[in-house]
Amino acid sequence: MGANKLHGFGLGLRTDHYADFRAAPARELGVDWLEVISENYLVPGGKPLAHLDAIRRDVPMVMHGVSMSIGGSDALDLAYLRELKALADRIEPAWLSDHLCWTGVNGHNLHDLLPLPYTEAALRHVTERVLRVQDVLGRQLLLENVSSYVSWSADEMSEWQFIAELTRRADCELLLDVNNVYVSATNHGFDPRAFIDAMPAGRVRQIHLAGHETNDDGFLVDTHDHPVCEAVWALYRHTIARLGPVPTMIERDDHIPPLAELVDELARARRECAAALAERQRAPMLEVAP
């Protein structure tokens, strides 16, 4: 299934909801497509892969990874990339994504999505690695902006400038996490709308929405264990008004509620998107990045 054939509103497939999606087609439950965490299905055989094979017959899917470390200094893990390709060949996702970050050094996985220095040297490094990954996978890669809590003193450009230029040089696409934009903007004191406005519209293939927490120091932490907050809904409306309709999903990774609650939240995403598109039609043509 090609990327241009996927539309609408999706959820992340989690073990809590396997039975729901096995019992009825996802679209009958109010879900247009599902996103799977790639690493959960790389082991041959077993129950997770059996569930995945059964569920994917009724609903389009996309793959989302957390282990590529596209910005890392260690060599790319070619064995991991071959496993990703084999899984993609098996389930035929509309696209495959990972995070614009690094996750470890010297062979040690730090189990976190760590921000890059936004420098020309880092841009060249990541561009070369993205091109190699796309060559191995035989498809374009989507990269997601991460939430961040620290920045590099060596930064030479903004995160949004780095992202836009990376997509141009590497001919890759974007998974725009609106919650992550809001979290990082709050933590670092920049305007989240400036970030959204700088995104190249033709490269944004998917949107994530999620919840976050505030820690004791006042920093926002991307936890994926709460409903989407009102400020993120407002930023999502701005995003759709700027970029037009983009396939959107709700992420929930902890405190996972019954499927019906997530479907209700997804229904709000549909309403917010429709309202933003109506506003887009009424407003003068907005200038957006190509």
Image: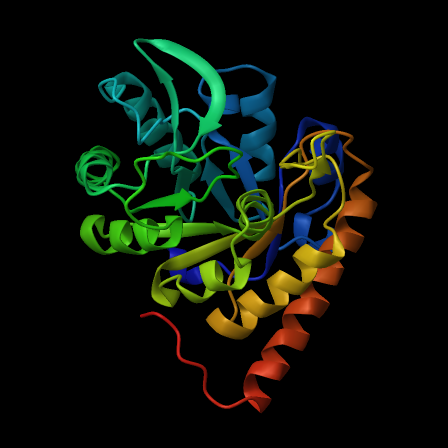
Residue 288 located left or right of residue 47: left
Please state the horizontal and vertical placement of residue 65, each as a whole percent of the image: 45, 31
Q: How is the image coloured?
A: rainbow
Q: Is residue 6 found left or right of 162 in the rendered image? A: right
Q: Point out residue 68 in the picture as x, y percentages from the top left corner.
A: 36, 27
Left or right, 263 with reference to 239 = right
Q: Position of residue 76 (x, y in %)?
A: 24, 22
**For residue 51, above or below residue 6:** above
Q: Is residue 43 visible?
A: no
Residue 130 relative to residue 233: left or right: left
Residue at figure coordinates x 82%, y 46% from the top left:
261
Number of marks drawn: 0
Q: Is residue 108 above or below residue 272?
A: above
153 or 222, which lies in front?
153
Q: Is residue 82 visible?
A: yes
- Considering the image in quadrants, where does the C terminus appear? bottom left
Q: Can you give x and y, in whole percent of width and height, for residue 127 in the image?
A: 21, 41
Nearer to the camera, 4 or 194: 194
For residue 17, which quarter of the picture? top right
Question: Which residue is rendered at x = 53% and y = 50% of the image?
Answer: 181
* Image point (42%, 49%), residue name: 94
